[in-house]
Image: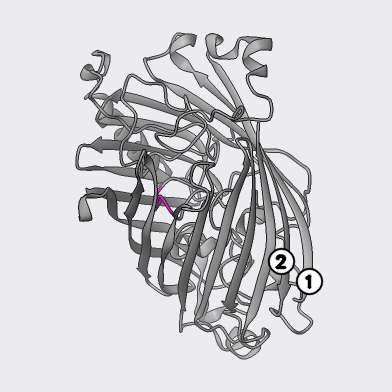
Amino acid sequence: MTNIRIVIVVGLLVLVMTTRSPAQDPAGPDEEVVTERLAYPYSIDLLPDDPAPRPFGEAPGASAGLPGEEADAFGPKTVTGDAFDRLFSTKESGITFGGRVTQFGFGLAGGIDQPVPPPLGEGNAFCYTGRSEYDAVFDLEKFGGLPHGRLLVRAEQWYGEYGNVSLRAGSFTPVVFPAALPPRPNNPGVPYITNFLFTQPLSPNWVVFGGKKDVLGSFDQDVFAGGDGTDQFVNQALIANPSFLLGLPYSFFTAGVVSPRDWGGMSVFVMDPKNRTADFMQFGDLFNQGIIIGGEIKFKTRFFGLPGQQHVGGVWKHEEQLDLRFAFSPPGPPYQPPGGGAATLWDSYTLYTGFDQYLVRYAGAQDRGWGLFGRASISDGNPNPIRYFLSTGLGGYSPLGQQRGDTFGLGWFFVGASDQFGPVPTALFGPRDGQGVEWFYNIQATPWLNITPDLQWIRPGLGAISTDNAFVYGVRANATF
């Protein structure tokens, strides 16, 4: 069985490599490609929602701003400016450094209102959490590789209170999701290599990738509600669809193909289901625990004469997962494997869709505006603890500070809980449908520093141990260097 899975991965890459001949031809200036983007927010998005992607010949990540954004006139984009280039001539040598430090100070009114076993905790608390990411991107062409080939190496760490108030809220989706990443709750301050990913465009229409990657920013992304929680929403429900995200490993081995097209694009990938956050390059047990396969198709739209996109996708998992009918506890924190001796199921699926649509583009700054977004999904409901999911909202550049770069978001979500939980968690924890609203306003204090007040109302999904209403409030500060 293991050999068959490995053959699937190799065969997928070989199939695409047979189309490699056009990749050696330089692309014209009008040709478009979608590869990974360095910076803002230093995450790889293999099918970004940029309504006007950069030309194939232009180096991705040349700007640290939003797609299409030019350099700000009132200062450098990063804390360090061009220090790395001046000291080490890194761009000329084919290496680009970057990173972020994000601080979270959040409080919770309500949430879990009785004693609970760890890692859960009682509500009515205020917590501090810090998170850092350090990136190095290698231009493989300058190291003797193929044109436009790149290698991303990323290290991540957290410190302070793991998860911030997320494990005290009693909700299925972490209310301060980025404060729970990387998912190593007992190791504050320890950096983990979460990405070691090769990306190779073969032509403007075919890109292959493979290596170790974190789950955020890969698919189900919207312009106004995506990323990894350090520049837009912080509630996981408004970052990506929880129906599949909460059941996926955080850092994993993967391989796949992306095909950008004039009408949109499509992608397909295979994933090793083992969480590799604390591993570096251990291939001996590759696909021993099963396999995850997914794909997505994205269509560009021009409603109201303004850009937008719609996407549909699915994820199928063949791995050992907890059978909710025989569970003795509610769903734990993300990426928690089945407990020893628990009854399990092997197959599960999630189907999802999403969209974003600009409603306003500012005169004189066509790369800036705001609009509408939405997501929906349905799953098997067992072993997936979330049967269906809905979200919608508004976001983008604020009309109050759009020249400075202020952004905002207002989103609503509904989490439909599975009705197949066992009698013990049903009696003790009362899993139920949850919902919430989040608002944030991102103040671009300097080109490298943004400060974000954030407010949330949630109806927790663990009804037997939580208040009916909980309020989350706080501030996030993000510095780019």
Question: Which residue range is magenta in the image?
Answer: 219-224
- In the picture, the disc for residue 196 is none
Q: Mark 1 highlights which residue?
A: 125
Residue type at mark 1: give it: Ala
Q: Mark 2 highlights which residue?
A: 165
Label 2 close to label 1 by CB (< 8 Å): yes
Estimate the x, y position of residue 154 in percent, counting from the top left.
Answer: 60, 33
Which residue is drawn at the image coordinates 65% and 79% (left, top)? Answer: 470
- Residue 221 colored in magenta in the image: yes
Graded by Cα atoms within 10 Å as few (under 14), some (14 to 19) or many (20 or more), the crowding at tag 1 reads some
| Element marked by disc 1 | strand
Q: Name the one closer to the observer, 77 or 15.
A: 77
| 93 in relation to 410, above or below | above
Left or right: 366 as drawn, with respect to 240: left
Left or right: 213 as drawn, with respect to 114: left
| 308 in relation to 132, above or below | below
Residue type at mark 2: give it: Val
In the figure, residue 304 lies in which quadrant?
A: bottom left
Residue 175 visible, this angle? no
Left or right: 172 as drawn, with respect to 479: left
| 31 in relation to 68, above or below | above
Q: Main secondary structure of the magenta part?
A: loop
Estimate the x, y position of residue 377 in percent, counting from the top left.
Answer: 36, 67
- Residue 374 colored in magenta in the image: no
| 272 in relation to 472, above or below | above
Q: Name the one closer to the observer, 41 or 347.
A: 41
In the figure, residue 157 lies in which quadrant?
A: top right
- Pointer 2 or 1: first along the chain: 1
Left or right: 321 as drawn, with respect to 265: right
Estimate the x, y position of residue 319 in percent, counting from the top left.
Answer: 46, 58
How far apart marks 2 and 1 lie (CA) works out to 7 Å
